[in-house]
């Protein structure tokens, strides 16, 4: 490879993006928005929300603590305490807004990035870190908080959610189910199948797509020719695009979609239009494929800052509130750090447990091979 071609391979792809994918034919769709990036409260003809000052402060607190937890996890990975971390930076409003729209009896199927939704469900944040430290396969009991384990096989949880929702309907319950997935996942066959099944069975499920503009290094233009929310129409259910950096709009739109599901009117696709401010994971380097000015443009739409501006302008929060929240954030970060460092290493052989409910010949063989391999170190040491 020549020096020139190496440099070309490393160049961010922005120029290619424009040529590879023509602009969608339809005009740019409107976002449902209730709070502008400047922190101004605006009205929407179909969606509204009436929250007390206390509830607004609660949403702000959720977002700040989630961001702080996420920053701490990233730092812990850099310090070698975690093997990997998938940051939600920039997606706090999408997750807290949708997460706070849920009822306790609703059921959540997340990807691997839904730390804010986990927070809303009451999953202790320290429990999210075991898998990323490599000391367990999950870290929480999904049935305690109706929050399924993180799913890394892209898109597969939309099928789990659909099946679960069909079961909820058969039971005659009025709970709803929500499946989180990304813009990249929307290209998966599993997602298309779950759309088909949920539509024809009228399953009480909300498909919450966080369009954070990137699937690792692939831009959304390579996933779709139409705005993602418009995909729903072809399957026979409604789709809506919401400002994913507006916590109020995310709450209002998700609540409405959940209510629709409870009434037996079937699925809704919510496309939360947002941005992944950080790397895909701590193993990724986005400077290789995207320009800094893109991030800067999205920084101006920060979900937390706009709510702070609104809270201050309306006199809904005073300096004491923000100071107390800073202290709470510090305490959370300290608790997370200490909990991670104190996590015991698992028993090596435990990874073979629970693969099957009963014994299995192949697992037994692998267990024996691994035991022999481990024993070989002991012999070397003698
Ligand atoms: C079935 C499958 N294919 C590929 C991967 C590798 N992979 C992990 S994350 C990812 C991109 C997902 O992008 P998106 O759905 O937009 O979610 P985001 O990470 O942006 O939240 C890919 C391809 C995987 N985990 N599973
Ligand atoms: Mg994405």
Image (cartoon, helix red, strand yellow):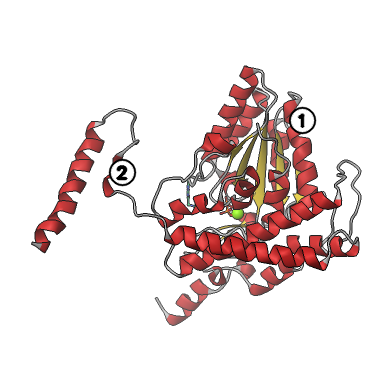
- Say which residue label 2 marks: 350
Residue at 88% in and 41% down: 46
- The foreground one among 65 and 151 is 65
Q: Are marks 1 and 2 in contact (CB under 8 Å)?
A: no
Total numbered badges shown on the rendered structure: 2
Ligand 1 closer than 8 Å to the CB at disc 1?
no
- Report the disc number at residue 233: none
- The answer to whether residue 33 of the structure is visible from this angle is no
Identify the element where label 1 is drawn. helix
- Say which residue label 1 marks: 260
Q: Is residue 364 left or right of residue 334?
A: left
The quarter of the rendered structure image containing the C terminus is bottom left
In the displayed structure, would residue 126 be above or below residue 179?
Answer: below
Q: Residue furthest bottom?
A: 3
Category of crowding for the residue at label 1, using alpha-carbon neighbours closer than 10 angstroms: few (below 14), some (14–19), many (at least 20)? some
In the displayed structure, would residue 172 be above or below residue 183?
Answer: above
Q: Is residue 160 left or right of residue 205?
A: left
- The foreground one among 309 and 151 is 309
Q: Place residue 39 in its image quadrant.
A: bottom right
What is the distance, in whole Å, between disc 1 and disc 2 at their CAs?
43 Å
Q: Residue furthest left?
A: 382
Identify the element where label 2 is drawn. helix
In the displayed structure, would residue 33 be above or below residue 282?
Answer: above
Q: In the image, residue 16 lies at what x, y percent?
A: 61, 66
- The foreground one among 3 and 68 is 68
Residue at 67% in and 43% down: 208
Q: In the image, residue 138 lies at what x, y percent?
A: 45, 45
The quarter of the rendered structure image containing the N terminus is bottom left
The quarter of the picture showing ligand 2: bottom right
């Amino acid at each position: 490879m020549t020096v020139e071609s190496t440099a070309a391979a490393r160049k961010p792809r922005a120029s290619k993006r424009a040529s590879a994918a023509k602009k969608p034919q339809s005009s740019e769709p409107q976002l449902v928005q209730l709070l502008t990036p400047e922190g101004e409260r605006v009205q929407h003809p179909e969606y509204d929300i009436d929250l007390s000052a206390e509830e607004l402060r609660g949403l702000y607190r959720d977002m700040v603590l989630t961001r702080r937890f996420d920053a701490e996890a990233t730092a812990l990975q850099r310090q070698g305490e975690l093997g990997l971390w998938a940051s939600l930076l920039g997606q706090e409003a999408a997750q807290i807004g949708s997460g706070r729209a849920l009822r306790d009896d609703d059921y959540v199927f997340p990807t691997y990035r839904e730390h804010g939704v986990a927070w809303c469900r009451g999953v202790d944040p320290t429990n999210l870190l075991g898998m990323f430290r490599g000391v367990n396969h999950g870290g929480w009991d999904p049935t305690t908080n109706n929050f399924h384990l993180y799913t890394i096989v892209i898109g597969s949880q939309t099928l789990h959610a659909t099946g679960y929702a069909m079961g909820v309907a058969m039971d005659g319950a009025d709970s709803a189910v929500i499946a989180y997935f990304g813009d990249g996942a929307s290209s998966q066959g599993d997602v298309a199948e779950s759309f088909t099944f949920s539509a024809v069975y009228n399953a009480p499920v909300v498909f919450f797509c966080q369009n954070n503009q990137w699937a690792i290094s692939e831009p959304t233009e390579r996933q779709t020719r139409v705005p993602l929310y418009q995909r729903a129409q072809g399957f026979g259910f409604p789709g809506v695009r919401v400002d994913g950096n507006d916590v109020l709009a995310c709450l209002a739109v998700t609540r409405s979609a959940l209510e629709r599901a409870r009434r037996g009117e079937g699925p809704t696709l919510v496309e939360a239009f947002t941005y992944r401010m950080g790397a895909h994971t701590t193993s990724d380097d986005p400077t290789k494929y995207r320009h800094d000015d893109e991030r800067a443009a999205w920084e101006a739409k920060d979900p937390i800052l706009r709510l702070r501006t609104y809270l201050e302008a309306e006199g809904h929060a005073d300096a004491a509130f923000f100071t107390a929240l800073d202290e709470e954030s510090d305490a959370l970060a300290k608790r997370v750090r200490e909990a991670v460092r104190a996590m015991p290493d698992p028993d090596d052989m435990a990874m073979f447990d629970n693969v099957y409910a009963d014994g299995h010949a192949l697992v037994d063989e692998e267990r024996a091979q691994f035991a022999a391999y481990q024993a070989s170190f002991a012999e070397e040491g003698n």
